Amino acid sequence: MAASPDDARPTSNGNRSKPVRNTQYMIAPAGPGISAQTLAEQLSQLGNILWTHDQRGVSGPPIAIVRMPDEAAAALRRSTAGSLIIEPDSHLRAASFAGPGAAFIPAAATMTALGPDLKVTIRIVSETGAPVEQANVRLIGEQASTQGQTDRDGNVDLTLRDEVPETIAAIFVNACSGHWGLWQQQPNIEANAVNTLTLRPLPLPDRLDWGGEAMRFDQIPDHCRGADIKIALIDSGVATSHRQLAGIKHGIDARSGEDRSWSKDITGHGTPCAGIINAAARADHGIRGYAPESELHVYKLPLDARCSDLIAALDDCLQNGIDVACVGVGCERGSALVEQHMAMAKQQGVSIIAAAGNSGQGVLFPACSPHVMAVGAIGRMGSFPDDSPQAAQAAAATAAAGGLFVPPFSCRGSELDLCAPGVAIMTCQSPDGYAVCDGTSLAAAHVAALAALILADHGDFKGSFIAKDAHRVERLFQILKDTAQPIGHPWQTGVGLPDAARALGIWSDQRPLAMPLNAGLRQMRSAIRQLDRIPFGASRAMMFEPPRGPANVTRLPLNPAPLAFRTAGAGTATVHELRAAMALAGLAEGP
């Protein structure tokens, strides 16, 4: 990752040095009447102006990206008396490829060192004995953890401090593509030796991935393919070298504005999402995009992406007439300037669907905004091997209905709108392979694809809501939410799992997913005990507290009328009903 522009440098003061922290800020006028040139002149003496948004021809008030000492920023706030919006240009982090849960990561070491550093060599091979290159290997000890990536011979050398082979608690292996990952508890690891581990091959399915079936993409007509709908993927780029993604022709680097680098994805984060949305179908396997005839526009974010890059991408969405923007990144600190540009995008008919985040805490920004649809992740039991990293996520998960579960990494809170498949998703991977991926960005991609189908084929968007405005966005969000199947507590799953067939008004037998009233006592207790443990909001103090909450929707009757779900005679239990039932049975939760 590129070095952070935020740094601390000492300044000499006699024989003493005082560190000066330089932070990257976004600065914009709070009202009209100030040009970009005037703003730049006003700020030129205070810090290093990296660039201004007017250089990209963006809409809205000018924004200057400035690197300056924190003290200078504080002084500028005082001197301008609210005439300028001054906020840190926060880093964004990807919402995919979730690592081991917190239960597997050791706390800081508190014990006396056990001896010299433990040095081990791990060799990763396929079932044929061929080395697996670029596999990520993570060792978890009682006191520390370490990770590395295998070389062309499949080897990686790792060092653990304050550990011996007997204290290694777990090992996680994730292949770049072509193989299932591996999870072993209490692995038999030897020091000063080559420890060989074998990965299972990843056979390509002959039908839709489990996520497509769970959302009932398999129940919609073949002509529902998202034609004429423009989807923006705001992520790390897309590897158009992949045979199923070669048809993607539109993209730009969100920071530099150049139009070439977007077609490469060195982190492999955006490519899986593009596969879910737009991958062309093939006759030899079932992996395909759910909106393959949509026009995908790729907005590549750099490795050190910040909120200013997200603003640039959103403004490009307006210029290109985007219908749906899928955002796979987020941060804990809110941004008034990003909020302004998201509101502007909504007013022009851009429906923003964002990953809730992978920290397992409160819903990240921008997903927590009421202008945005926030999507969390779910998994399904039986969709992965018992010794895979996904099995580790399931072991620490919260059970939901129908064999589904909420993985511990998925962010949660009252701002969550929907949940969608985001564990063990088989999809395209850079440069031309296939991988099993996890994360809320994959869940958001599923919902973005369904949104494109609704906009393309639902009657409302050929009539009353054809105009690209905020009413169109809210109507789309209402259809997505009102036709979803409830599967768990709203703080963990939003209103539920989207149903493609029902959202498009197609009658077919419903797959019952609602939690029956005879749910297991263990599931009831687990759900209830977690209600008061979910942290609300961001974990860091905010200079700007964005409005939070689920996405705003247009409250109108659905057309066609929503269909009743068949629950095989089982009702749907709320938390209050569960508590009442447990109390009557003498099973109320203890202190």
Image (cartoon, rainbow, N blue to C red):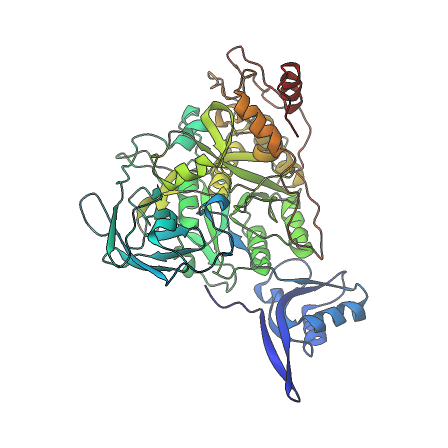
Asked if residue 45 lies left or right of residue 327, the reply is right
Q: Position of residue 248 (x, y in %)?
A: 39, 48
The image quadrant where one finds the C terminus is top right
Which residue occupies the foreground of this view, 48 or 261?
48
Furthest-right residue in this view: 81
Res. 32 image quadrant: bottom right
Q: Position of residue 65 (x, y in %)?
A: 62, 67
Q: Residue at x 40, y 48 (%)?
A: 271
Res. 279 image quadrant: top left
Q: Residue at x 66, y 49 (%)?
A: 344
Q: Residue at x 67, y 58 (%)?
A: 60
Marker count (numbered): 0
Which residue occupies the foreground of this view, 145 or 511?
145
Q: Position of residue 458 (x, y in %)?
A: 54, 29
Asked if residue 51 lies left or right of residue 46, the reply is left
Camera sees residue 243:
no
Camera sees residue 305:
yes
Which residue occupies the foreground of this view, 414 or 428?
414
Q: Is residue 467 above or below residue 45?
A: above
Q: Residue at x 62, y 65 (%)?
A: 54
Q: Is residue 481 above or below residue 1?
A: above
Furthest-bottom residue in this view: 14
The image quadrant where one finds the N terminus is bottom left
Q: Position of residue 382 (x, y in %)?
A: 38, 29
Res. 147 image quadrant: bottom left
Asked if residue 425 lies left or right of residue 415, the reply is left
Q: Is residue 321 above or below residue 421?
A: below
Furthest-left residue in this view: 128
